[in-house]
Image (spheres, grey):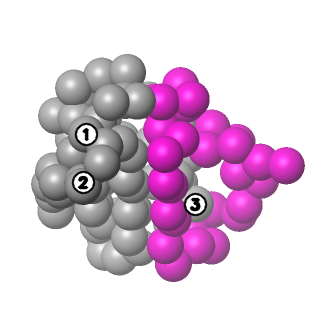
Amino acid sequence: DAAAEATGCPDGSVDAAISVNNVMLWDRPTGFAELFRVLRPGGLLVLSGHRHVLDVDPNQLVDDAQAAGFTDVKLSLRARRFNSPAAELLAHRPEH
């Protein structure tokens, strides 16, 4: 088993990393740094979580992603029919 903080993947070996409803379980700075490390240049991070279970304001996820080196970070809140909005974050590891 692997975690966001220690994936066990080699450097730059992953095209995309997807996290659904688990970022609240991470040590966020360590998890974002690890996902940045394993993504290839140009790789994509996709993260989503229901707002009511996030332990931080969704804008903190943007700050954490940028602090880890991600660029083109986009955050959106998508309305949900029965739950609070879903926070969705897209970010890229720079090409160079």
Q: Earlier in the sequence, mark 3 or mark 1?
A: 3
Whether residue 69 is visible here, answered yes or no, is no
Is 22 in the magenta?
yes
**Which span of residues is magenta-colored?**
1-28
Contact check, label 3 and label 1, Cβ < 8 Å: no
Q: Residue at x 48, y 30 (%)?
A: 24
Task: Please state the horizontal and vertical placement of residue 52, each as a whole percent of the image.
Answer: 33, 30
Q: Is disc 2 surrounded by few (<14), some (14 to 19) or many (20+) residues within 10 Å?
A: few
Q: CA distance from mark 3 to mark 1?
A: 31 Å
- Helix, strand or loop under label 1: loop
Contact check, label 2 and label 1, Cβ < 8 Å: yes
Is 2 in the magenta?
yes
What residue is pinned by disc 3?
Answer: 38
Which residue is farthest right?
1
The amino acid beneath tag 2 is: Arg
Image height of 29 relative to 6, above or below = above
Task: Please state the horizontal and vertical placement of residue 39, each as a whole percent of the image.
Answer: 51, 66
- Determine the image quadrant of residue 93: bottom left
- Helix, strand or loop under label 2: loop
Which residue is farthest top?
55
What residue is pinned by disc 1?
Answer: 84
Q: Nearer the viewer, residue 94 or 5?
A: 5
* Magenta stretch secondary structure, dominant: loop
Res 96 label: none
